[in-house]
Amino acid sequence: NPSGQAPEPTPQSNSGPATQTAYQLQSKEEGAVTVTITPQTIETGKPLVFTVSLSTHSVEINQDLVKVSELADDQGKQYKALSWDGNSGGHHINGTLSFESLSPAAKEITLTIKDMAGIPAWPFSWKILP
């Protein structure tokens, strides 16, 4: 270090709740639509909560996200979508999608949005962190 000062230490841990930073957002673009999903809560015994953003410049998005979203774990358990608090219809959809509580046996989950913009399935998967 030419200035003679010690380099800044790199923080190794985040003091906030692990659920805020542990699970990375995933984004997929197919055709004219971009779907971005950010896990908010993935914790055993708690409802599974995801922030969902859909964006397009050419097609109208008017699906009911509770009806077209499926969540399953690696054990074969299906989780029911409970609520969507975002808008519907238009070119930009944003909101929070909630599902039933996570089973303790789950090691991985896959959220699939079905039949959007002519694409039969948009799968997004996350490994459950310890």
Image (tube, rainbow, N blue to C red):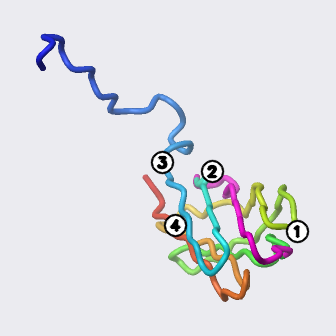
Instruction: Single out the mark in the foreground, 2 or 1.
Output: 1
Q: In this view, does 125 lie above or below 4?
A: below
Which one is earlier in the sequence, the residue at label 4 or at label 3?
3
- Could you say which is closer to the camera, residue 11 or residue 6? 6
Asked if the magenta segment contains residue 98, the reply would be: no
Quadrant of res 87: bottom right
Residue placed under numbered mark 1 in the picture: 89
**Element marked by disc 4:** loop
Contact check, label 4 and label 1, Cβ < 8 Å: no
Q: What residue type is labelled 1?
A: Gly
Q: Residues within 10 Å of mark 4 (few under 14, many from 20)?
A: few
**Element marked by disc 2:** strand
- Please give the label number shown on residue 22: 3
The x and y percentages for residue 126 are 50, 64
**Element marked by disc 1:** loop
Cα distance in 3D space between marks 2 and 1: 26 Å
Query: Can residue 115 be seen at all in this image of the molecule?
Result: yes
Residue placed under numbered mark 2 in the picture: 41
Q: Which amino acid does label 4 sit on?
A: Ala
Instruction: Single out the mark in the foreground, 4 or 1.
Output: 1
Contact check, label 3 and label 1, Cβ < 8 Å: no
Q: How crowded is mark 2: few (under 14 residues within 10 Å), some or many (20 or more)?
A: many
Identified at 58% across, 52% down, the residue is 43
Quadrant of res 104: bottom right
What range of the chain is rendered magenta? 43-62
- Could you say which is closer to the camera, residue 92 or residue 16? 92
Which one is earlier in the sequence, the residue at label 4 or at label 1?
1
Identified at 50% across, 53% down, the residue is 23
Residue placed under numbered mark 4 in the picture: 105
Query: Can residue 49 be seen at all in this image of the molecule?
Result: no
Q: How crowded is mark 3: few (under 14 residues within 10 Å), some or many (20 or more)?
A: some
